[in-house]
Amino acid sequence: MKRNLIELGVLFISSLISVAVVFYKIPASLLQQSIGVMIVILLIVVHRFVFSRKQSLPFIVSLALTFLVSIFLQLLVLSSGGFYSPFLILFHLFAISASFLIGVRIAIGFLGFSIIALVASTLLDSKLYGILINDPWSAILYILSFVVIVPLYNLISSTYHLEKAVSKILSSQLKLTTTQLEQKGAQLELTKKRDESLMGGLSDAVITTDLNLGIVSINEAAVKILNIGSDQARGQPIFALLNLKDIQSRVVDAEFLEVEEIIRSGTTHLLSNLLLYTKGAAIPKKINLRIHPTKNLEGQIDQLVFIISNYAGGGHTTVGYQDIDEAIKRNKALLETVKKELLEKSLLQLDAKVELLGKTEEDILTAIQIANHGIKPGFSLIDAADLMQRTVEGEKGFAKSLGVPLNFSLSKEFMEKFTAVDFEGKQPIPLAFTSQYFTVFTEPHWINFLMKKILDLSILLSTKERNPKVDVLVSYDAETIAIEVSCISSQKQIPDTLPDNGNGLESYLIKTITTLLNIPFSVIYKEESRILNFTVKLSKTPVR
């Protein structure tokens, strides 16, 4: 506000000087000389400040420039006929320029003071006054033009700024979109070249399909297997060209592979021991089939990659390699502890630590085997009750060394069938009694290892609790055998690692084996009794 008042004051002074020049009838030649000097001063000011690298004019310079331009224009117009001067249009141009560069108030002030100067000069000059009397409407029209010029500026200014803003937004958006398209194009090109290079160099057959299983691309190895060119294969359903069966001669198709579940879960599936029938070959070839879903730039699954490789054993897996460095470090640390305690002749729980060393070594080797080769299941009929009795018996020494009672029992329904039989001293309970109720078709080696890991985990979780214990219950119904392992624990779910004991692979192995063998597995925590319950269910019906 203060600045505007000062600028208006400068304009008022310039107008007074202009009127004084007219009032005192200063000769036109002197006026022309004065105007020439002003022009030179203006050029110097403009050259020094406007066209220099300075971002803005100092306020004092801005005032001087406003004063000089104002008095220059007023003297020029007043000395050349006032309202009837051919240079009167310069007032309008200055008002518009001042509105853009300085402000609307300054433009209005300039026009107001200029009108006063024009009226005063007309009244003081008898010739101009006579013209005004004979033609007053011209002066009135000029005055109206001064009044209209400011609203006209506002309209032009708002339109100008609006168009400028819209143009800036559109330009920015266009630039951003263009940049994004260029980046995505470069990424797609890089991905395409990388995939072509990888697929071309693979000895395995690689077939890429869309989510409807229409072939998108195949590599050279797949061309040889399918005996069809890549262009002819594109767009055809994969199973129209790929003739696969399992070892039981069942057709391997989208339903068999559970493709919808693969797309939903986003996990890689591996099926081994499949038979590939090709044209011209009398004997089918045994292969492994890996199905890998791939994602686009938006993170959505849009393609499936089928990789056919020579059969090398293994099972049906959906997991990848597990980093076991932490388990190795824990094993080394435990060994150092054992050595230290031996040197100090401290045998407290030393037997448990020695057994943990053996378990850790076994877990590490098993984790490496699963990560590198998967699981090669060998299904057979087993008595789950007998297997668990022997497994529990083998874990009792480890549990005792940690002070954890380990108990085994069969279901109440089974025990009630043999109330006349005294099972005391008959441990394990003979197969003659259990086989009829607890026989299942499953993988004995991995089920035994799985239950050992569940028992290890339960014992370790219960170790530091008050009144620790681990209970094992085997029950049955018409379709399944349920093996329940319960332990006293503050841990409410299966942990990924054990912070104080164990090797950290127990949880990994439990989750991996149940996933690979497709075994129903659940974990339930009971708050009121602080019991963590692990349940494994084995189907009595043979599964593939």
Image (tube, rainbow, N blue to C red):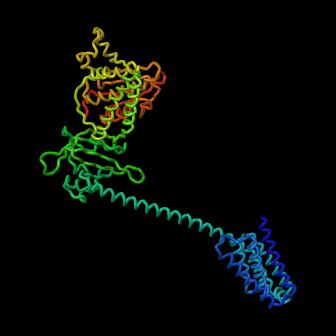
Q: Position of residue 178 (x, y in %)?
A: 46, 64
Query: Looking at the image, how many numbered discs can be counted on the residues?
Result: 0
The residue sitting at the left extreme is 282
Query: Which residue appears at 35% of the width and 43% of the height?
Result: 267
Q: Is residue 493 above or below residue 1?
A: above
Residue at the spot x=72%, y=72% of the render?
Answer: 150
Q: Nearer the viewer, residue 480 or 323?
A: 323
Question: Where the C terminus falls, by quadrant?
Answer: top left
From this viewpoint, is residue 504 visible? no
Q: Is residue 24 visible?
A: yes
Asked which quadrant contains residue 538, the reply is top left
Q: Is residue 161 left or right of residue 243?
A: right
Whole-percent x and y of residue 407?
Answer: 36, 18
| Residue found 13% across the figure and 45% down from its top | 283
The percent coordinates of residue 384 (x first, y second) are 28, 23
Classify 361 as above or below 128.
Answer: above
370 vs 159, nearest the viewer: 370
Closer to the camera, 152 or 205?
205
The quarter of the displayed image where residue 233 is located: bottom left
Quarter of the image with the N terminus in it: bottom right
| Residue 521 percent location from the top left of the image | 36, 30
Q: Is residue 395 left or right of residue 151?
A: left
Q: Looking at the rendering, which quadrant does residue 520 occupy?
A: top left
